[in-house]
Amino acid sequence: MPLWLIGMMGSGKSSVGRVLAARAGKPFVDTDVLIEEAAGLAVVEVFEEEGEEAFRLRESEAIRSAASIAEGVVATGGGAVLINDNIGVMRSSGPVVWLQADPDTLATRIGHAPGRPLLTDVNVADRLSVILENRRGAYERAADHIVATGDSTVEEVAVLVEKLWNAS
């Protein structure tokens, strides 16, 4: 059964996921990488060339594919929870952990957001605040557990998530 990591861009899903998978000796899957491999394009290029709706369809395919792994850690894109079917697939196949951070922390981690299609030509912290507010309910519906990542290191967050995973 896979462990799912959800949360905003910059919350640490990929970084924590890699560390957690290595600690557990399990595979790591990043749904954005699955999308890029299937499309033959970077995520930002999929957004630009195909649009967000097509990206979300590709994202749903990647989530269904990742759900089939017997064991491992899956980092999702920040908007994966926007489609209710994705939430159902994740929740039915393994525990879901929301890595949570405030918009200022997220903006600091992301920097000027190269390759982030939803953050071009905007004040990053302000835009992240709006995105988080719009997604908060979906994250809450999807999550079995919430782990705050704000002041913690990647390793500290991985240890906390590992304890939740082992208790599942």
Image (cartoon, rainbow, N blue to C red):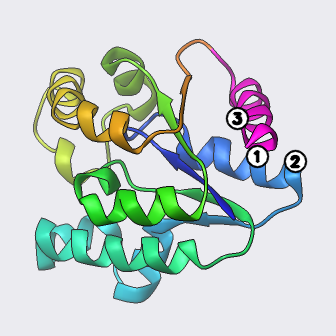
Contact? badges 2 and 1 (CB < 8 Å): yes
Q: Main secondary structure of the magenta part?
A: helix
Residue bearing the label numbered 1: 20
Q: Is residue 165 magenta?
A: yes
Q: What residue lies at 55% left-to-right and 73% top-to-bottom? A: 66
The kind of residue on which mark 1 rests is Leu
Q: What residue lies at 33% left-to-right and 56% top-to-bottom? A: 80
First reached walking from the N terminus: tag 2 or tag 3: 2
Residue bearing the label numbered 2: 23
Figure quadrant of the N terminus: bottom right
Contact? badges 1 and 3 (CB < 8 Å): yes
Q: CA distance from mark 2 to mark 1?
A: 5 Å
Give x and y (percent) for residue 114. Answer: 32, 48
- Is residue 28 shown left or right of residue 78? right
Query: Could you tell me which secondary element the residue under label 3 belongs to?
Result: helix
**Residue extending furthest toward the top:** 151
Above or below for 3 versus 9: below
Above or below for 157 versus 30: above
Give x and y (percent) for residue 111. Answer: 37, 31
Q: Nearer the viewer, mark 2 or mark 3?
A: 3
Residue bearing the label numbered 3: 161
Magenta region: 152-168
Give 12 or 91, whichever is nearer the viewer: 91
Q: Nearer the viewer, mark 1 or mark 3?
A: 3
